[in-house]
Amino acid sequence: MYGRYTQELGVFAREEAARIREDGRHRRFISERSPSIKLLEYEKGRCVRCRICAVHCQRFLMSRVGEDWIFLILLGLVMALVSFVMDFCIALLLQAQKWMYGGLDSNVILQYLAWVTYPVVLISFSAGFTHIVAPQAAGSGIPEMKTILRGVVLKEYLTLKTFVAKVVGLTCALGSGLPLGKEGPFVHIASLCAALLCKFMSFFGGIYENESRNIEMLAAACAVGVGCCFAAPIGGVLFSIEVTSTFFAVRNYWRGFFAATFSAFIFRVLAVWNRDEETITALFKTRFRLDFPFDLQELPAFAVIGIASGFGGALFVYLNRLIVQFMRKQKTINKFLMKKRLLYPALVTLLISTLSFPPGLGQFMAGQLTQKETLVSFFDNRTWTKQGMTEDFNYDIHSTAWKHPQANVFVILVIFIVMKFWMSALATTLPVPCGAFMPVFVIGAAFGRLVGESMAAWFPEGINTDGTIYPIVPGGYAVVGAAALSGAVTHTVSTAVIVFELTGQISHILPIMIAVILANAVAQSLQPSIYDSIIRIKKLPYLPELGWGHHEKYNIRVEDIMVRNVRYITLNSTYRDLHEILLIANLKTVALVESAESMILLGSIERVQLQALLSQHLSRERRLEFIRDAERKRVSVVSTPSSEEGGQKVNHEVRFQISTEESSLFTPVHPISPKPLKPALKRTTTAEKNIEIPTSPHDSGIGLRNLLCARPQTDAMEEDPDAEDDMTLGEVEEWEEQQLDEQVNFNNCKIDPAPFQLVERTSLHKTHTIFSLLGLDHAYVTSIGRLIGVVSLRELRKAIEGSMTVKGVKVRPPLASFRDSGTSGTSSESEATELHKLWDRHSSRSIPREQQPNTSDSDDKSQ
Amino acid sequence: MYGRYTQELGVFAREEAARIREDGRHRRFISERSPSIKLLEYEKGRCVRCRICAVHCQRFLMSRVGEDWIFLILLGLVMALVSFVMDFCIALLLQAQKWMYGGLDSNVILQYLAWVTYPVVLISFSAGFTHIVAPQAAGSGIPEMKTILRGVVLKEYLTLKTFVAKVVGLTCALGSGLPLGKEGPFVHIASLCAALLCKFMSFFGGIYENESRNIEMLAAACAVGVGCCFAAPIGGVLFSIEVTSTFFAVRNYWRGFFAATFSAFIFRVLAVWNRDEETITALFKTRFRLDFPFDLQELPAFAVIGIASGFGGALFVYLNRLIVQFMRKQKTINKFLMKKRLLYPALVTLLISTLSFPPGLGQFMAGQLTQKETLVSFFDNRTWTKQGMTEDFNYDIHSTAWKHPQANVFVILVIFIVMKFWMSALATTLPVPCGAFMPVFVIGAAFGRLVGESMAAWFPEGINTDGTIYPIVPGGYAVVGAAALSGAVTHTVSTAVIVFELTGQISHILPIMIAVILANAVAQSLQPSIYDSIIRIKKLPYLPELGWGHHEKYNIRVEDIMVRNVRYITLNSTYRDLHEILLIANLKTVALVESAESMILLGSIERVQLQALLSQHLSRERRLEFIRDAERKRVSVVSTPSSEEGGQKVNHEVRFQISTEESSLFTPVHPISPKPLKPALKRTTTAEKNIEIPTSPHDSGIGLRNLLCARPQTDAMEEDPDAEDDMTLGEVEEWEEQQLDEQVNFNNCKIDPAPFQLVERTSLHKTHTIFSLLGLDHAYVTSIGRLIGVVSLRELRKAIEGSMTVKGVKVRPPLASFRDSGTSGTSSESEATELHKLWDRHSSRSIPREQQPNTSDSDDKSQ
């Protein structure tokens, strides 16, 4: 229910219609597919028994289809296949580039053209395809999934179109060889798979229409995405929890594990089946020695890697945001780029691939290696230097890329890190499906390797002094660096687990944990995570996290941030009030209070419901009926010409005082009422009115119909083609004015009887918790049943951002000083005052009230 | 706030007093320790600057002490030290037994006596010590922590006494060599550490008094406990989340990781420092080959281990519960054992150690090995058999225990598994601090080894057919089995991660994950986890989990399970109503509604508050004042003898109509009122009354005072020793009767203005989620502001247990059939009816109300 607030009426109506249509289809489908067993039993033939048995089996399977584990297995299977096929295609694309580059080694210019054109074409195609098919597919997808899992419905992000765009776009983007990642997009693709599978499965079982279940499945899908990407089920589950959830339901834990394990298993089995591997092993298997992986005295170096990675991660997020904001602010560039959408990706690709052209600058940064090859060479357990000099390491084709006759290994590594850093930050701003995890991971590994090689050069005999020589393993440092930098950028600790699963070794657990935690500590105090940064840039409806040191959050109360001027309707409200509220306020729900005087909160009504109420009250049918009534009355008036107006007025009053009996008659009146069979003569009148609407927008009665476009006029006309409408425009206006003054009849209105309520003294911390836990959009603030304010996500976000530690400086909580010196005083005091008032009011009530009806009738609300 | 409901008044008052006392002490402490800098600046001396600097530093440190990470580092450090010392002592105790046993090898009978007496003495001491110091320390502690983290305050479980009892008791229990675990107790010990540290730290900073923060810290402590126990930080965090939480706040994630990593680090560093290890390595380091850890075709065998472990785990939980219930049911045994508390532990220990006596039956089950040695031998990467025959494996002292001249390795393993299985189930019922994780882990490893050895015997050349011979590694099977069985018993998946960290190898990730998930699937469908089982046995206030296939949960609504007969008070309630409610209902909070007619929920009041209201209203001071008033009046009556009674009555009425002004005068009357200096002559009267109380328990006025024992009579007497009390008992009664008919004045009463509200149509699933998320104790069910029912944990638990899949049979949800055929019909219909009523009521109200005051005055509530 909560997530629905963001949907507009049109979307909701369309969706409902689609659901009903599908329901019907589904029922037809079932009835076609499973012929009744009883019918079969009466049939004769050779294989009746077999067929009965088959039907039984089918039914059993049908009933089983609703089980979670079947869905999860299917999801894992589909995702593993998608992932394997994509990996295969990406590898092919990368190989093609290498082949072209290698084949043209006679001419450097041709070689350069081939090297550069290929990625430019691929990226341009990817950007264009994504833009045409589904622009939502661009970017990582994790920020959007985070928002969706919070309960906000972003329907267009989970469609088949988006799936196609994401898969094709990502394959091309990664095939171009640019420093782009696939983790984020894989999370999105897995979620898309789950959503589509849910839709598909809903043909078989009704359970797939349950929204809360689908969200649970989406959470599992996120784990599957990461799990498939790295063949890391445990790390995948943890990473997806850390990245997408605020509060995690432990009962959903097994779902993620189950699906991710299954899909990682299939993913690796496919590799075995494809003869890539002999058995199931890790993706980037390392071969560090087990007996003495590292010395205790190496820990400070690991800690340094962690801290430096923290700063680096924060810098990366900042740089990424800076580039996006720069591109947005430069209006002339922006306009130009908006026109030629493919120019920006093409230019960026051209720049990056030119710089990494192997015979050019690329020779100083191992430009010819793909991401995967780079990682393999970094994670190697052999050192590249000896006594500070570059060793002759020809054992591996990948490692030779790091050897340069003129330059030292250290220089090459530094150039690699610096260049890749800004290249990755730039490349991840491209409007193609891409993530930032892998590029950052590679940069981290390079940094770790750099530190490791330095350590190896510094202590060529190892650090341990106990006799046995255990040389330093720079590959271990690379692993630590990779985990730390990617942890810092994404603000996660589980990159440590991902690294264990990726490398198949857990021997460096303590250095990795220490580095990751330190990196997180530094990065979290400087910048938001890359995903939160994107959420802010895209302005998605998400609640920011409370910072690390959130002590000051305990001091802000709801009363400091709530909006006191709440729009509400009362049980005595007239339709005019309703109309005004709908015109003025752009609320999704409106509070319903008992009366403007008591302000006791009874519930909340959705805007849609109010619109429906109003449109029904002013509908053509009611007007026609009114005319018919008037006609009938005129007839009776002809017979008894006395008390024409008086009689009607009495009738009117009676209707609104004994409205219960009346209202039950009210709705079914229309179908029962005898329709005079008369051709639709007056249609032109309606058409005229339709045309006239824009000319008098300020007229409340007609401007209203603009507002209430929920029910198209044409439908109404077709519905009731032979009704009479004798009223002139003036009469209609008069009638509507008259109708607007009537009291609202809430009988046919769906009221949410228990909207979430907070108290003035609820702390910001608790409010944040409740909002995140329950996925709220807004909450009313009440004081002993009385509505006194409202807090929505917007206020909460402002309050949190205002008091967040941005750029290291702690800002004072807003209004805190105001409150301290303000009226409220101590808690018990204010509560007592509040109660006082209530008691006052109550005791004044229990005195026989004479003025009461007056006030509630004249009821002039101050808003 | 929510957790407080379980506390009785006495506890609460005591705690409050303690808090205030401590506050004062703390302030004194601060002021003593940090002499004002300004003062210092005026002083003269050699090192004034140094001292100023020191004070600044001190202040800075003080302000830093509130930071989370300092607390977490301290916690990790303390816990690592405790854990290390305990491990050291346990190792010493175990060594002592071995030494005794080895020294007496000349005489079997003496050897037997030594072998048996030692554990009996240790266990008896442990049981006795625990019983005397803190009986809460017995058992695992995880069920209690689970309950505490849900928000229920079990104060006595987090005291220093419990800490001492747990540490000493656990050391002795584990030192005895019985199959007992330390994981659960370690979780408890870490939580105790955290709670005590919080108390200690609250001397320095106010932040440590925040309850929600303390619960966050306890959650981190649980992770530290597991992390220290196995030197497994990641597994520890995950295990503690799975075992203790229902909903996990991801923002607390880093706390667990940080503390657990730090403590695991220190724990392992201590081992290095102690020269046990050369560097930081895993606890049970394995040396399986990296290049080809297992073949794809071995996976079915791993799956078989998983499924069998699932059944085994369920059987273990069942057996454990059966033993407890059997001991409870046998009343004669029970009575006898209650008298001689140490007899049961001693007998069980005698039985177990007799059976494992190495020269006896122990030789067929490696009786001389400790748990740790057993595990090391199971995880060995060499096979014990060749071609089905026992190989000559003398390479290791531990492995020789598995070689027997007469028996096959398989036979010994089977005997070991069967014997240890029931022994462990029996031993974990002992009233000593002990867990079940480790014994189960060992049994699982044995089972895995059995399967592994069988596989090795079956395929002596390995399974792979590609040329290279990769023999099967039975140690890998042992690892898989250990993870699967412990996962099945505890219903967790994270045992897989614990195993990786324990062994330092992650190469078997897929087999382990598959086995653990299968084991969980089987075990969860058969039995609750061992911790949930203990929660049920101990009847702790915990909400059971929704089962795996909880589709039927979507069909039960709150209206099916709520209690419709809610006790409430209204704004018009008299003190008599209050008294009745307090006497009849044993509620922790009472609902406050506007009036019995409208039933609009205004809030809830705690029982304590109501008791205070009542006792204040009937207090001696008020009575004395009443007497004084009467006296004064009599004096004035003497001067103007007319309208004696009338005047008082008017006064009385006026007071309760303009009660706002009155009540502000009300409380401060006592200190201002002139005290007539008179010796306490009438004390005997009060004493007499005190004695008379038990004789007339049915008298409401005096039985009341029994109820309101919150304020001891003696205190009141000492407070106001020289007041006069001239009334006779009859007069007092009359006065009290009169007072009871007055309307309650809620001015000085603390009302919770927003108790949690549900709607009738809220599903059981959602209710469960909300209750678990917010740690609720009860929630009111309202319909458009009107109170119509209440749901407490009890109802919810019943509903869930009623519809839970116990022993494979799915029970129909209670009342579901009733509801289907019942009155409610479709949702919209019932809502419309509900609204009807409201509107009815409202429209009838908006008619000028003459009878209103009558009804609200005479106000006879039907309960």
Image (cartoon, coloured by chain):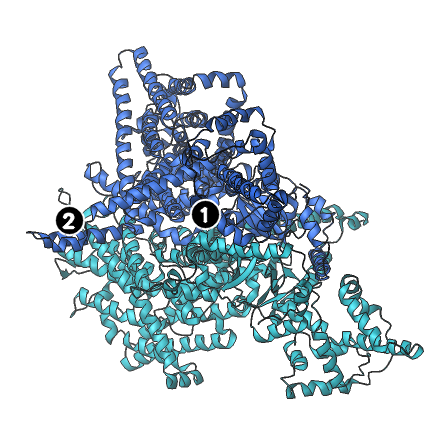
Chain colours: A blue, B cyan
- In the rendered structure, the residue with mark 2 lies on which chain? B
Q: Residue at x 46, y 61 (%)?
A: B559
Give the labeled residue for mark 2: B463
- In the rendered structure, the residue with mark 1 lies on which chain? A
Q: Kindly state the secondary structure of the residue where label 1 is placed.
A: loop
State the residue in front, A700 or A754.
Answer: A700
Whether B209 is drawn above or below A588: the answer is below
Q: Residue at x 50, y 17 (%)?
A: A335
Residue B842 at x, y percent in the picture: 60, 55
Q: Amino acid at mark 1?
A: Pro
Can the viewer see residue A764 in this picture?
A: no
Whether B741 is drawn above or below A141: the answer is below
Residue B560 at x, y percent in the picture: 43, 63
Q: Is residue B43 left or right of residue A369?
A: right
Can the viewer see residue A710 in this picture?
A: yes
Q: How many marks?
A: 2
Q: Which numbered marker is on residue A668?
A: 1
Callout 1 crowding tier (Cα within 10 Å): few <14, some 14–19, many ≥20: few
